[in-house]
Image (tube, rainbow, N blue to C red):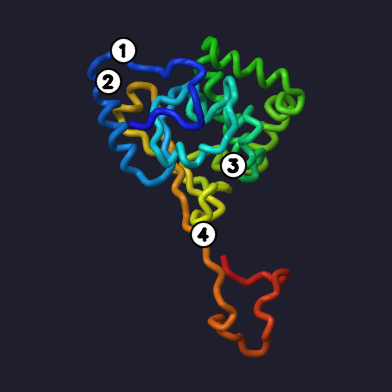
Amino acid sequence: MAYQAGGQRSQPRPVPESSRARAYLQDYATLLEAVPFPSVVFDHRWDVVLTNSAFERLFRSVAPHPTAMPGDNFLRFVLFHPDAATILGEHESSWCLPMLAHFAAAVERHGHDHQLQSIRREIAQDPIMEAAYRHGLPHWIRAVGPEAVEHDGAVRPLLHPDPRWGSDCRVVGETPKTLQDMGYSRLTLVLREARRPVSSARVPRRAGCTGGHLSVVPSGRG
């Protein structure tokens, strides 16, 4: 059962009070470990409940941090860890803004939660992040549309330390009802194999234009 990624936890992992729920999580952790892609289960504060070994491998190289380790609280990692941008490509636009949007929704639902309020205070202490949260985020959502905020189905840049994996992943939200009833959510980062360069000898030549299709000319494909 893989429970943490990137070092010692800074606080105890949330555990359900019900023995039945704990037994379910133990079996679910076995299922999670069988998944070859990084997968994480977290609560409404983004406190991590379960991770698998693939998740650990993805974030193994991040430096220790007192409050923002990926295996402790995934939101804090995305927003506050200085190494986040070395793994999460296009960090601000593809990861920070969607997470800030989900955080804003969580604050609306659980406004009195002291841990969420603590994250809100940390955001306020960073002038750039505070401006993004208060002013940039609403404009960004209007500009890109609500679908950009959704995790499930999004294709986002990812810089995996293993070179066999490509430069992006598809984020898949797959939360069964039992986990949902516990107040938990699950995300899996479906990795893609790196594309191997094609030998020039194998590329078919186009009639009339030996240079192929110019990058500045639309290909005509939808």
Q: What residue is rendered at 68% in x and 86% in y?
A: 209
**Residue topped by disc 1:** 17
Marks 2,1: beta carbons within 8 A: yes
- SS for dot 2: helix
Residue drawn where x is 47% and y is 32% of the image: 5
- Cα distance between the residues tagged 2 and 1: 7 Å
In depth, the one of 121 and 29 nearer the eye is: 29
**In terms of sequence position, does the residue under pointer 2 or pointer 3 come before the other?**
2
Q: Amino acid at mark 1?
A: Glu
Q: Earlier in the sequence, mark 1 or mark 3?
A: 1
Question: In which image quadrant can residue 24 be found?
Answer: top left
Identify the residue under disc 3.
Answer: 88
Image height of 111 relative to 80, above or below:
above
Disc 2 target residue: 21
Gap between marks 4 and 1, in whole Å?
43 Å
Position above or below: 34 against 16: below
Left or right: 132, with 164 as reference point: right
Task: Please say if the residues under marks 3 and 4 sit with CB atoms less than 8 Å apart.
Answer: no
- Mark 3: few, some, or many residues within 10 Å (few <14, many ≥20)? many
Quarter of the figure that contains the C terminus? bottom right
Asked whether, in this view, residue 199 is left or right of residue 180, the answer is right
